[in-house]
Image: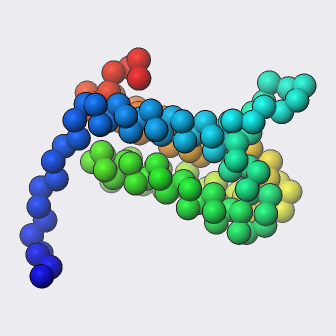
Amino acid sequence: MFNSNKAKKEALSQEEVDAAIKRLERFSKITDSSIGLPFTKFNIGIDAIIGLVPVVGDAIGFLLSCYVLFEAQRMGVSKRVKLKILVNMFIDFFGGLIPFFGDLFDAFFKANTRNTAILKEELFKKGKLNKAS
């Protein structure tokens, strides 16, 4: 039966936090900057490639971005931080819907990298992450 009393969640261990951050950094690199563009120093990720498919690609990119939000929730960060992450996700989604400009926007905005940095900054402030991480 559903219990209306919320059970207090156990805090993640330092090892779990470190492992999650490593996963998020790898995820962000793959989605935002894993493919180097020839003759430039600029990188794009699979989010920009997927975003080339009108609407559906942007929706898939949005769903992929939910992973960062999921990890933020699991780590117990504040609603303010989760809201910042959501705002970046929606900016990336709606920006990507604009024909042609949206594809360029996806390549430059790099929402997952931004959101991972927001999460890392918050964890550092709370003393749950070393600056070297």
Up-down: is 124 above or below 52?
above
Question: Where, by quadrant of the figure, is residue 28 drawn?
Answer: top right
Location of residue 36 by image quarter = top right
Residue 72 visible in this rendered orientation of the protein: yes
Quarter of the image with the N terminus is: bottom left
Q: Is residue 49 left or right of residue 116?
A: right
Residue drawn 11% across the image and 75% down it: 3
Q: Nearer the viewer, residue 133 or 98?
A: 133
- Nearer to us in this view, 29 or 131: 29
Count of numbered badges drawn on the protein = 0
- Rendered position, 37 above or below 82: above
Percent x, y of residue 44? 74, 39
| Residue farthest to the bottom, as pictured | 1
Front in this rendered view, residue 79 or 123: 123
User: Quick check: 115 left or right of 17?
Assistant: right
x and y, in percent, of residue 87 in the image = 52, 55
Tell me what residue is drawn at x 14 percent, y 79 percent.
2
Residue 124 position in % (x across, y down) = 33, 28
- Residue at the spot 12% in from the left edge and 75% down from the top edge: 4
Asked if 74 appears above or below 15 in the picture, the reply is: below
Image quadrant in which the C terminus is located? top left
Left or right of 128? Residue 45 is right
**Location of residue 34 by image quarter:** top right
Is residue 80 visible in the rendered image? The answer is no
Q: Residue at x 46, y 38 (%)?
A: 23
